[in-house]
Amino acid sequence: MAVREPATYEEALERIVELEGQLESLDALLLLSERAASDDGDRHALVEVARDLDAEDLLGR
């Protein structure tokens, strides 16, 4: 993955927001993965966790 260097302060702020969003997605995926590991195979439990995190779109990954 190439590192983008922002040219302006505004671009730097936009990049920070973008990275924060990616971090939240990774945190949600980690939580879903941990839950799946301890789950008895019932996908409904994963859907509930995703709904709680407002991250249902991540289930399709």
Image: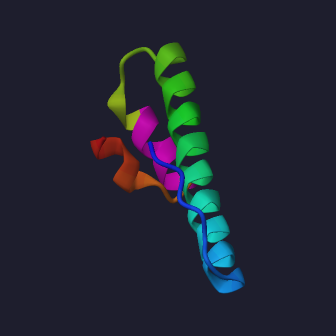
Magenta segment main secondary structure = helix
Colour pattern of the rendering? rainbow
Residue found at x 50% / y 38%: 29
Q: Is residue 15 placed above or below 29 in the rendered structure?
A: below
Residue found at x 67% / y 73%: 12
Question: Which residue reaches farthest left?
Answer: 60
Residue 50's spot in the image, x, y percent? Answer: 48, 47
User: Which quadrant of the rendered structure holds the C terminus?
Assistant: top left
Specify the segment rendered in magenta.
Answer: 45-52
- Quarter occupied by residue 59: top left
Residue found at x 56% / y 23%: 34
Residue found at x 61% / y 42%: 27
**In this rendering, would 1 be left or right of 20?**
left
29 or 5: nearer the eye? 5
- Quarter occupied by residue 17: bottom right
User: Which quadrant of the rendered structure holds the N terminus?
Assistant: top left
Q: Is residue 56 placed above or below 15 in the rendered structure?
A: above
Q: Does the magenta stretch include residue 3?
A: no
**In this rendering, would 45 be left or right of 22?**
left
